[in-house]
Amino acid sequence: MHFNVPLNILAVAAPAISSVIPSHGTVEVFKRDAVLDARDLELAETHGVNLTQMFKHSVFKRNDGDHITIWVDRGYVEEDEDSEAGFKHAKRQSTRLVGGSRYHGSDQYDTCYSHDRKDATVSISPFTGGIVSIRDWAAGRKGYFPFGGTHPVGWRSLLVAGSNSGANALYRARVQEGSISVHTGIGTEDVRDDAAWTNERRKLFNGRYRAASYGWETCKLDGTGIRMNFEIRGTDIVV
C-alpha cells in the first residue's frame, strides 16, 4: 500500500510533553503540522492511514508496551487550536485529555441525536484497546468533523487507532445516501458516545476482547439536521 505523502512530513516529528493517563500510561500529543519520520510513515502504512487525508495527533503509550497511535482526519476542527504555540499548546491539550473533561453548551461538540446503533462484533473485529483509545481521545477533545460544503462526499475515515498488535480500529462516517449534503458535522462527544456504546458490547475471542458497530444518527451544526451513517470497525476490512 503506497500513498502520495505531503513533502512537509519527511522529517523528524517533535512530540508534545507527555502526560499520565491512568488507563494507558502516558500520552504524547503532536501539533497538526508536526513533521513525521520514517518510522511514522511505516506505521501509517501498517495502520492503513492515507497521510494526504489524515495527520498524526497522539500516541497512547500503554503500560503493556502495545502503544496506540491516533490518526485524525485533516478536516477536524478544534476549539482554539491555533491560539497557543509550541509545547505550551501541546501541554494544554494533554492536560485536558488527562482530565477527561466534558464540554457543555455548544452544539459543535455534541451535534448528533436520534442515535440508532447496531452491534457488529465478529471474530475479526478490532481489539477493544483501539476502541477505548478512540473513546478516551474524544472524551478529552472539544471539536467536530465538518461535512458538506467543500468537504469530500462519501465515507471519510475520521479516526484511526493503530496499534503494534494489529486489528486497528477505525471510526468513519458519511452523509446518508439520499440526504442533502449541507453543512453538518459529527462532534467529539458523539464519537465518544459511539465508541463507548461499542466497547460495552465487546465479546471475547480466543482470550482477547473485540468489538465493532454501525449505525445512524441525525447531526447538525446549523440549519436542518441531516441523517448520517457511522461505523467502528477494523481498517483491514473496509470496503
Image (cartoon, helix red, strand yellow):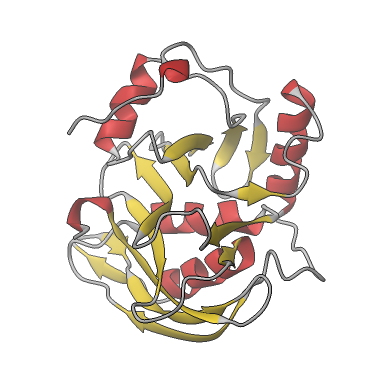
Q: Is residue 60 above or below residue 187?
A: above
Residue at x-position 43% and y-position 69%:
199
Q: Is residue 136 left or right of residue 98?
A: left
Residue 63 visible within the image: no
Task: Pinpoint residue 25: horizontal percent, then vertical percent.
Answer: 57, 39
Task: Pinpoint residue 13: horizontal percent, then vertical percent.
Answer: 52, 17
Residue nearest the observer in this picture, 227 or 189 = 227
Q: Is residue 103 above or below residue 87?
A: below
Residue nearest the observer in this picture, 57 or 80 = 80
Residue at x-position 59% and y-position 35%:
26
Task: Pinpoint residue 93: horizontal percent, then vertical percent.
Answer: 72, 40
Residue nearest the observer in this picture, 158 or 97 = 158
Q: Quadrant of residue 94?
A: top right
Residue nearest the observer in this picture, 136 or 224 = 224
User: Across the whole image, how many numbered discs are drawn on residues?
Assistant: 0
Task: Pinpoint residue 146: horizontal percent, then vertical percent.
Answer: 56, 59
Q: Is residue 167 left or right of residue 55?
A: left
Q: Is residue 185 above or below residue 14?
A: below
Q: Quadrant of residue 233?
A: bottom left
Q: Is residue 129 left or right of residue 93?
A: left
Residue at x-position 25% and y-position 62%:
125
Q: Is residue 9 above or below residue 192?
A: above
Q: Is residue 201 left or right of residue 75?
A: left
